[in-house]
Image (cartoon, rainbow, N blue to C red):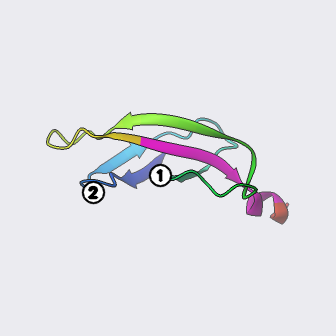
Amino acid sequence: MAVLECPFCYEILEVKPPDRLHTAFSFAKPIPKSFHKNIVTKKHKCQNLECKKPITIFWYAPLEYFNRI
């Protein structure tokens, strides 16, 4: 489980990574060649009743992780 803040209203969001490989996340698409394989895009909606804006989270496997192994 990852704890994030809504980028619009700063409400706390709890989201689950798509799998064990894609552990890093970003609200913006990661820089090319900074991640392993592919990016998994997940759409969420802010749970704050006054906000409810759509939030796109980009999940990826950072290359730094693979360099440490």
In this rendering, the answer to whether 37 lies above or below 30 is above
User: In the figure, residue 18 lies in which quadrant?
Assistant: top right
Name the residue rendered at 39%, 36% in the picture.
44
In this rendering, the answer to whether 18 lies above or below 6 is above
- Tell me which secondary structure the magenta stretch mostly adopts: strand
Which mark, by number, is residue 10?
2
- Amino acid type, residue under disc 1 in the picture: Phe
Quadrant for the C terminus in the image: bottom right
Q: Which residue is mark 1?
A: 27
Pointers 1 and 2 in contact (CB under 8 A)? no
Residue 61 horizontal/vertical position (percent): 69, 50
Mark 1 packing: few (<14 Cα in 10 Å), some, or many (20+)?
A: few
Residue 11 horizontal/vertical position (percent): 26, 52
Q: Is residue 29 left or right of residue 65?
A: left
Q: Is residue 57 on the magenta stretch?
A: yes
Most extreme residue toward the left is 50
Helix or strand or loop: what does disc 2 sit on? Answer: loop
Number of numbered labels in the structure image: 2
**Mark earlier in primary sequence (1, 2):** 2
- Amino acid type, residue under disc 2 in the picture: Tyr
Name the residue rendered at 82%, 65% in the picture.
68
Name the residue rendered at 59%, 45% in the picture.
59
Q: Cα distance, mark 1 to mark 2?
A: 13 Å
- Give the magenta part as a residue range: 56-66
